[in-house]
Image (cartoon, rainbow, N blue to C red):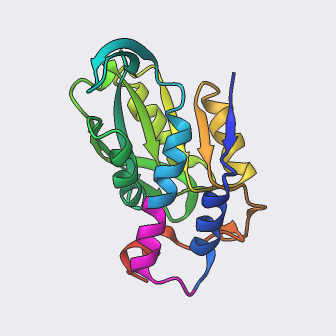
Amino acid sequence: MKKLIICDHPLIQHKVSLLRDKNTGSKEFRELVNEVSMLIGYEATRDLPLKEVSVETPVAIARTNVISGRKLAIVPILRAGIGMVDGLLALVPAAKVGHIGISRDKRNDNSVSVYYNKLPSDVASRDVILLDLMLATGASAIKAIEAVKQQGVSSVKLITALSCPEGVRAVHDQHPDVDIYTGAMDEGLNDELYITPGIGDGGDRIFGTK
């Protein structure tokens, strides 16, 4: 039931490599996050249903396909997930956007709580794509998934630029129905619970706050 999709398209791999480089500045880092998110989002929306319609071209009537039936909500996990939103909206401009803020207990990295939760009023009727730049311990993703499911959402996907085995395992242990789409799978977590080799603190690098 659970599914992990590592998006190995050459463009994604190239851009993730640039994200890793400590010399990549905030402006370029933000642009890369946007581009990687769009490319991974392309894969994550591959299963959107279609319906056949008639379109009048300048030459004749064409029987062709348009997306049908399923509405999307894009929900970034604050704060690094914000940098991924525009990439998804470029693909699905009609999607609604919610936000979930997760705070972490500095004494216990796996102890997290929701400090902000603003979802579309009709989120229960939408498929939700959660966005987080990195999937490290998985604690924030698990809490965010719980928050959207509590609103009646039945279909959740998680998009992340970078993951590690510990985080994937944690999410799938708690939510085996959630598909994870990622740009790369790293070795694991270091003693400070950063993904290694990773990209450092993604939020700080997006917003230039380090």
Kindly tell me whether residue 203 is visible in this rendering. no
Q: Residues in magenta?
A: 23-34
The foreground one among 28 and 62 is: 62
Q: Is residue 128 above or below residue 59?
A: below
The foreground one among 4 and 104 is: 4
**Residue 93's image quarter?**
top left
Q: Is residue 6 above or below residue 36?
A: above
Q: Residue furthest right?
A: 187
Where is the N terminus found, in terms of image quarters? top right
Q: Residue furthest front?
A: 59
Q: Residue furthest bottom?
A: 23
Rendering coords of residue 114 (x, y %): 37, 46
**In the image: residue 148, left or right of residue 119:** right
Please tell me whether residue 29 belongs to the stretch shown in magenta: yes
Rendering coords of residue 197 (x, y %): 72, 71
Q: Is residue 41 above or below residue 55?
A: below
The foreground one among 151 and 91 is: 91
Kindly tell me whether residue 98 is visible in this rendering. yes
Residue sitting at x 68%, y 27% = 2
Rendering coords of residue 72 (x, y %): 35, 30
Please tell me whether residue 185 belongs to the stretch shown in magenta: no
| Helix, strand or loop: magenta stretch | helix
Where is the C terminus found, in terms of image quarters? bottom left
Q: Residue furthest left?
A: 121
Rendering coords of residue 164 (x, y %): 70, 54
The foreground one among 140 and 25 is: 25
**In the image: residue 132, left or right of residue 70:** right
Tally of numbered tags: 0
Residue sitting at x 59%, y 84% = 22
Residue sitting at x 62%, y 31% = 174
Residue sitting at x 47%, y 63% = 33
